[in-house]
Image (spheres, helix red, strand yellow):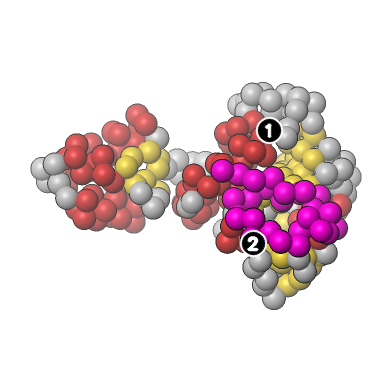
Amino acid sequence: MNFQKRKQKILAGLEKQGEVDIKKLATELAVSEITVRRDLNQLAADGLLYRTHGGAVKVNPNEKPHTFANKTAQNAAVKDAICRVAAAQIQDGDIIFMDCGSTVFRLCQFIKNKKIKVITNSLPVIYELQESAVSLNIIGGELDGDRQAIHGTTANEHIARYRATKAFLGVDGISVNGLFANSEKEAGITTAFATQSAYTYMLCDSAKIGKETYLNFAALDLINAIITNAPQEKLAGFEEQGITIFHAK
């Protein structure tokens, strides 16, 4: 089977299922896994799909930029486990903040049927939830094209007008020394959301726990809880500072 025929079958599988697996494709196409990987890499380079560790997911270029969707697809199983725990904390009637993090974005699939209000600076979150039971408010301000999110002074001032029952946020790093970011605009939006929320959850995979970047923008008392897949030994010291830990499995 030549590349063009394999391409048609791969794209048909994506259209039907939303994702494909390298091992299954190799069996179905009667080729090696190396050939499948090469095909997927070529199709990803052409913008026809997003590569994941074990395969690929469907692309919708009219809704989500390739770079952001690729990021959300990385470690998808871990992110989904974290987001299932997060979704269990949300009840009908809640008003929640969601930022533009790739883990937070994956929360969308678990809350579409909840009668809640979501206030966000993330365009992908808006796209994902726009035809669901969720009521939406989007923060105004300066567009960051790479992040597909709204940032800046105006955005922070806009957030200050709202009050949320809960916030679900991401962060570049978190340790017993506080919260860490890779940019001041990310630090600003996180601080703005957390300040206006009655209860703030940080959604962090294990790699973020204990990580410290150059910008230590807040102490741990800015947040209330961490939802993570990190092992207990990496979490020593957080509960002593009053942080509730939710374990994702």
Camera-nearest residue between 206 and 92: 206
Image coordinates of residue 14 in percent, x first then y, are 34, 36
Region of the chain picked out in magenta, as a range: 221-249
In three-dimensional space, the C-alpha distance between marks 1 and 2, rounded to whole angstroms, equals 24 Å
Q: Does the magenta-highlighted stretch encompass residue 237?
A: yes
Residue at image x 47%, y 52%? 74
Q: What x and y, as percent, mark residue 197? A: 84, 45
Judge whether 180 appears above or below 165 on screen. below
User: Is residue 164 found left or right of 100 in the rendered image?
Assistant: right
Taking depth in this image into account, of 164 and 127 the one nearest to the observer is 164
Let me know if residue 229 appears in the view: yes
In the rendered view, does 18 fall on the left or right side of 211? left
- For residue 95, what is the image quadrant? top right
Q: Amino acid at mark 1?
A: Ala
- The extreme bottom residue here reads 214
Q: Quadrant of the C terminus?
A: top right
For label 2, count other residues whose C-alpha is less than 10 Å away and answer few (under 14), some (14-19) or many (20+): few
Q: Amino acid at mark 2?
A: Lys
At label 1, counting other C-alpha atoms closer than 10 Å, the crowd grade (few under 14, some 14-19, many 20 or more) is: few
Residue highlighted by disc 2: 234
Image location of residue 44, percent across then percent down: 34, 52
**Count of numbered circles on the image:** 2
Q: Which residue is mark 1?
A: 88
**Residue drawn 72% across the image and 57% down it:** 151
Could you tell whether 129 is left or right of 49 in the image?
right
Image point (28%, 46%), residue name: 22
